[in-house]
Amino acid sequence: MSQNELFSFTYPITEADIVKANIKLNPLHPIFEAHFPGRPVLPGVYMMQMVKEVVEAWTDMKIRLVLGQDLKFLSVINPEENTMIQMELKISTEGEKIRIVAQLLSNAVVFFKFKGVFVQL
């Protein structure tokens, strides 16, 4: 589990040029009591944390975000309705830069899209 038991993910695998991981949310995590009472929603900052942690697992290195070019929150992730979600990543490197195109989805619903750059710590 990551982020104090909020989520866990399968080790990322590569299919063609896409890195994929399955993410399991813990709907009983205390963050959902405050965000939002009676209607739990996964905070966007944790979606970014998921991207970072999956990329770190795939690259086997610690990284930090240096540029978030495009962040789109397209649908709400309710952990009671969506305990399992998928992450799809396109990862390319240019010198020290790790360019990422990511999305979180479940079936045909895309919840979050991100384009950005990380660097190794």
Image: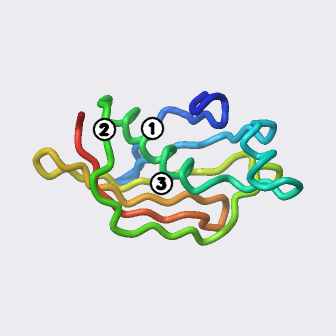
What residue appears at the point 32 percent right and 49 percent down from the top-left corner?
Answer: 65
Question: Is label 3 or label 1 in front?
Answer: 1
What separation in Å lies between label 3 and label 2 (alpha carbons)? Answer: 18 Å
Q: Which mark is residue 63?
A: 2
What separation in Å lies between label 3 and label 1 (alpha carbons)? Answer: 13 Å
> If the image is split into quadrants, where does the N terminus sit?
top right
Quick one: 45 or 2, which is closer to the camera? 45
Q: Quadrant of residue 102?
A: bottom left
What residue type is disc 3 on?
Answer: Glu
What residue type is disc 1 on?
Answer: Glu
Q: Which mark is residue 88?
A: 3
Q: Quadrant of residue 4?
A: top right
What residue type is disc 2 on?
Answer: Ile
Is residue 68 visible in the rendered structure shown here?
yes
Instruction: Say if mark 3 contacts mark 2, CB within 8 Å.
Output: no
What separation in Å lies between label 1 and label 2 (alpha carbons)? Answer: 9 Å
Element at label 1: helix
Dot 3 or dot 2, earlier in sequence: 2
Placement of 120 over or under 67, stated as above or below? above
Instruction: Say if mark 3 contacts mark 1, CB within 8 Å.
Output: no
Placement of 27 over or under 37, stated as above or below? above
Dot 3 or dot 1, earlier in sequence: 1
Question: Is label 3 or label 2 in front?
Answer: 2
98 relative to 49 in the view: left or right: left
> If the image is split into quadrants, where does the C terminus sit?
top left
Residue ranking furthest to the left: 95
| Callout 1 crowding tier (Cα within 10 Å): few <14, some 14–19, many ≥20 | some
Residue ranking furthest to the right: 38
What percent of the width, then of the height, locates residue 79? 76, 50
Element at label 2: strand
Q: Which mark is residue 53?
A: 1
Quick one: 27 or 23, which is closer to the camera? 27
